[in-house]
Image: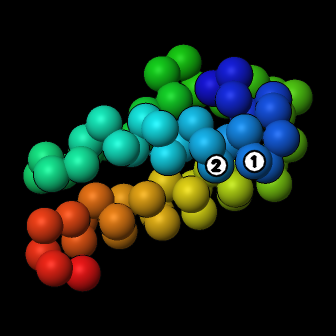
Amino acid sequence: PLALNGTVECIQSEVKRICSLFKGQPGHIFNLGHGIEPDIDPNKVSVMIEAVERESRKILSFGQGQ
C-alpha cells in the first residue's frame, strides 16, 4: 500500500515486480494487505489496478507462445 504514495512510475514498477514473482504459476490474487489509506489519491488506485490487469495478462500468456 505504501507504493500508492509514490509516482505513477513507482506504482507501475512495484506492481510489475510483485506480479513477476508469479510468472508461470496459475492464478494469483493481488492484495493490498491492510487496505488503502484515506488520503490516497483515487487516481493512483486506478493506476495500480490498470497495472495489475496489464501484468496479469502477461502472466496468463507466459508460456503460451504469445
The kind of residue on which mark 2 rests is Gln
Residue 22 vertical placement versus 2 (above, below): below
Residue sitting at the far front: 65
Q: Residue at x 35, y 68 (%)?
A: 57
Residue 2 vertical placement versus 20 (above, below): above
Q: Element type at marker 1?
A: helix
Q: Residue at x 31, y 36 (%)?
A: 21
Q: Position of residue 42 (x, y in %)?
A: 80, 49
Contact, CB < 8 Å: mark 1 with mark 2? yes
Q: Residue at x 69, y 29 (%)?
A: 3
Residue 20 vs residue 39, the one in the foreground: 20
Q: Residue at x 51, y 29 (%)?
A: 32
Residue 64 vertical placement versus 14 (above, below): below
The kind of residue on which mark 1 rests is Glu
Q: CA distance from mark 1 to mark 2?
A: 5 Å
Disc 1: which residue: 9
Disc 2: which residue: 12
